[in-house]
Image (cartoon, rainbow, N blue to C red):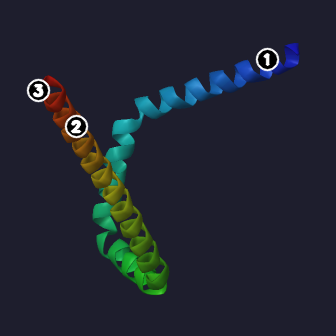
Amino acid sequence: DDRKEQILLKMQEYKEKKHTYYQENREKRLEYDKEYREQKKEKLKEYRKEYYKKNREKILQKQKERRKKLKEEQTMADKTDDEIINEEKGLMSNNINEEE
């Protein structure tokens, strides 16, 4: 049990150390990445083009599925809004009838 706590403590310390290092070197890393992208711009562009050609069907299928899912979610959200509006209209008409 004590050993488990020590291991968990070491893991937490490592995680904090890693996070601190990440934060301290963030700007340098971002600058390096920017320079790298500028230097290798054409090579990266060509790589992406080849990757797309190679994986075109998979990419298009994923896009199609994602769009379908988003459309279904939007439809559900719209139906929910419509149902809420209809319920409110129903409540309002019931209140009017009760007052008369």
Name the one closer to the observer, 37 or 77.
Answer: 77
Badge 1 marks a residue whose secondary structure is helix
Look at mark 3 in the image and give the residue it sits on. Answer: 100
> Circle 1 sits on which residue?
6
Q: Residue furthest top?
A: 2
Residue 3 versus residue 22: which sits nearer the camera?
A: 3
- Residue mark closest to the camera, 3 vs 2: 3
Q: Please report the residue visible at 86 percent of the width from the left and 13 percent of the height from the top.
A: 2
* Label 3 vs 1, first from the N-terminus: 1
Q: Nearer the viewer, mark 1 or mark 2?
A: 2
Residue sitting at x 78%, y 23%? 7
| Residue at 30%, 56% in the rendered image | 35
User: Circle 3: is it few (<14), some (14-19), or many (20+) Cα within 10 Å?
Assistant: few
Residue type, numbered disc 3? Glu
Which residue is under mark 2? 88
Indicate the position of residue 76 as horizontal and vertical percent values.
36, 55
Hey, what amino acid is under mark 1? Gln
Q: Within the image, what quadrant is residue 47 found in?
A: bottom left
- Which one is in front, 18 or 70? 70
- Which picture quadrant has residue 14? top right
